[in-house]
């Protein structure tokens, strides 16, 4: 858990008051999750994500938030995730990765801690990891072809895709009974170590999100080919993973 900056606290407090004003007694809890609850949070760059838990009566009235969408966007607040306690209970087998990721980095800013006692079934989690890896591998290959080998498109593909794997990697570490690091970089590195992936490659890929690493078009293409090969290797490894 990060130490919340004054600016972030102001955004969180304002959002909380707006949601309380809309739902009053139908509001169960408001939970800040994702990068804003970790050391990875970057003001004006990272989205601020909230889970808003409502009663059944409250969830039927979520159109009330429509008037706030534009102002939330200006504050870097993503569209909140509106759920009920019943939905959470009945969806753990369908979305174990998503709930594990919430549990891994969150802060209750109002009401009940609905995540604390959630139990993630490891078999459900392994199955979703397998599906997600295979699906994203197919997509990664398709988008690699669509870049036509152009530097800007290759860099954008790496930039957008590498973070999508962090949530899966976090779940894979959980399956291996490993402590889950707080930052995206450390999650990538620990997964590489645990599953014998090319840590040096993934270190470069995550660095491309900033300006620290400059690569030529040919180098970017070569890194993408290796990237795809490593994800395929990982997918095959999860196929064989015994719990």
Image: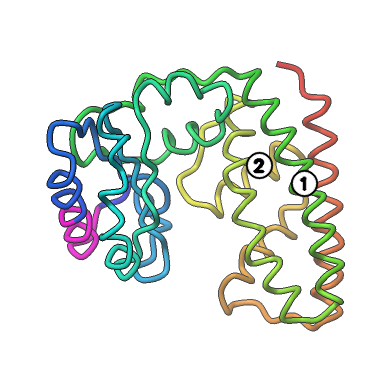
Tell me, what colour scheme is on the image? rainbow
Q: Is residue 59 above or below residue 177?
A: below
Looking at the image, residue 153 lies above or below residue 187? below
Q: Write the start and end of the magenta stretch as one range.
A: 4-14
Residue at 48 percent across and 51 percent down: it is: 183
Percent position (x, y) of residue 39? 38, 55
Marked residue nearer the N-terminal end (1 or 2): 2
Image position of 47 with respect to 128: above or below: below
Q: 212 or 159, which is in the foreground?
A: 159
**Which residue: 84% across, 72% down?**
221
Any magenta on residue 142?
A: no
Tell me what residue is drawn at x 86 percent, y 79 percent. Answer: 218
Residue in the foreground of this view, choosing between 126 and 215: 126
Taking the magenta stretch, the answer to whether it contains residue 13 is: yes
Q: Which residue is mark 1?
A: 197
Mark 1, secondary structure of its residue:
loop
Q: Which mark is residue 191?
A: 2
Residue 212 at x, y percent in the picture: 59, 77
Residue 135 on image: x %, y %: 76, 44
- In three-dimensional space, the C-alpha distance between marks 1 and 2, rounded to whole angstroms, equals 8 Å
């Amino acid at each position: 858990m990060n130490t919340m900056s004054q600016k972030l606290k102001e955004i969180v407090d304002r959002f909380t008051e707006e949601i309380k004003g809309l739902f009053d007694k139908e509001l169960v809890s408001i939970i800040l999750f994702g990068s804003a609850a970790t050391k990875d949070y970057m003001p004006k760059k990272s989205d601020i994500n909230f889970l808003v838990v409502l009663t059944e009566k409250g969830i039927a009235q979520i159109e009330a938030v429509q008037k706030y969408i534009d102002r939330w966007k200006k504050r870097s607040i993503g569209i909140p995730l509106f759920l009920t306690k019943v939905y959470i209970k009945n969806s753990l087998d369908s979305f174990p990765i998503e709930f594990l990721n919430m549990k891994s980095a969150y802060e209750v800013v109002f009401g009940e801690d609905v995540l604390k006692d959630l139990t993630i079934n490891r078999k459900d989690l392994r199955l979703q990891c397998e599906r997600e890896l295979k699906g994203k591998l197919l997509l990664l290959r398709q988008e690699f072809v669509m870049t036509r080998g152009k530097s800007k498109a290759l860099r954008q593909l790496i930039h957008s895709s590498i973070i999508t794997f962090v949530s899966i990697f976090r779940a894979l570490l959980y399956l291996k009974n490993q402590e889950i690091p707080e930052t995206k970089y450390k999650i990538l590195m620990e997964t590489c170590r645990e599953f014998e992936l090319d840590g040096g490659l993934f270190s470069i890929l995550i660095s491309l999100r900033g300006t620290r690493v400059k690569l030529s078009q040919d180098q970017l293409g070569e890194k993408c080919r290796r990237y795809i090969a490593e994800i395929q290797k990982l997918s095959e490894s999860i196929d064989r993973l015994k719990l």
